[in-house]
Amino acid sequence: MASLAEKRLPDPEDRPVDPQARPEELRLLEALLFASTEPLDLATLAKRMPEGVDVKVALAQLQADYALRGVNLVRVANKWTFRTATDLSWLMTRESTETRRLSRAAIEMLAIIAYHQPVTRAEIEEIRGVVTSKGTLDVLMETGWIRPRGRRKTPGRPLTFGTTEAFLSQFGLEVLGDLPGLEELKGTGLLDSRLPTGFSVPAPSDDPTLREDEDPLEADDNLELLLTPAADPDTSQGS
């Protein structure tokens, strides 16, 4: 039996070390992200990197390297991209050629779609309590923040709407779950603190998969015609 003196004491150098990407791996990853015109997901980056590279580790290291620079490595909708550092965004204001303010109706519709998706136009109108104009939907579609997802399996098979990755990117969200909840909305004054009993804010879902009550869009769908509403109540009556 070995004596205590014969037992090997742990060597401090034997402690496990955190994995680190090699400099050449970071350069490759950096080049891929800078060259891409759109954010890249983990799977796409892994395919383009040499075999055996731990892309997650490399991304974390590259993100740390850029944390204090003029551009930061950020994750948007589970994809990675370089963006101007938030505190320097004012430098880019001259690049904006036009600023369009959303109407109150458009903001309300966008919020309803974000929190209630997939949601139909009729469901939006029921929640808002007013008729939704085609123009408002058109504006939101033009921004690229919402999209038709499918068709509800109900009479008339109305379109269902949801948000896009562009929506997440515009508002700096990684996932829809980052949207403010009930207490946060109250704290910012966007909701009255004296709400009806049982009032709740739905938990939005990022799942792009069609629900059981949705059919996929058809190849010959003309979305412009589908969005055109019936005549408004105030114009459908004879004068």
Image: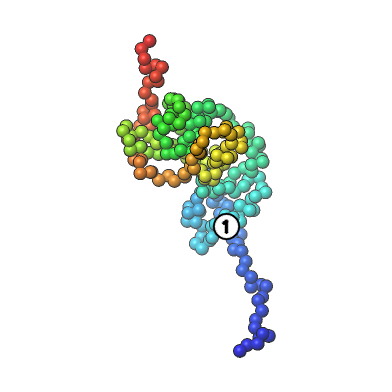
Q: Is residue 27 above or below residue 92?
A: below
| Nearer to us in this view, 78 or 158 | 158
Q: Give the image quarter of residue 185.
A: top right
- Of residues 203 and 161, which is closer to you in this image? 203
Q: Residue furthest front?
A: 197
Check the image and tell me how it is coloured. Answer: rainbow
Q: Which residue is mark 1?
A: 58
Q: Is residue 219 visible?
A: no
Secondary structure, mark 1, is helix
Image side of residue 22 versus residue 231, left or right? right
**Residue furthest top in the image:** 239
Q: How many marks?
A: 1
Residue furthest bottom as drawn? 1
Q: Residue at x 54, y 57 (%)?
A: 55
Relative image position of residue 39 (x, y in whole percent) = 52, 46
Using the rendered view, name the quadrant where residue 194 is placed: top right
Tell me the quadrant of the picture where the N terminus can be found: bottom right
Residue visible at 38% across and 32% down in the picture? 223
Rendering coords of residue 61 (x, y %): 61, 56
Relative to 136, say whether 114 is above or below. below
User: Looking at the image, can residue 90 be seen?
Assistant: yes
207 left or right of 54 in image: left
Mark 1 Cα shell of 10 Å, populated few (<14), some (14-19), many (≥20): many
* Residue plotted at (47% across, 45% down): 206
Residue 159, x across and y down, in percent: 38, 34
Residue ID at (64%, 53%): 65
Q: Position of residue 35 (x, y in %)?
A: 54, 47
Q: Is residue 10 above or below residue 145?
A: below
Q: Is residue 91 above or below residue 43?
A: above
Q: Give the residue type that dot 1 points to.
A: Ala
Quarter of the image with the C terminus is top left
**Residue 86 figure quarter:** top right
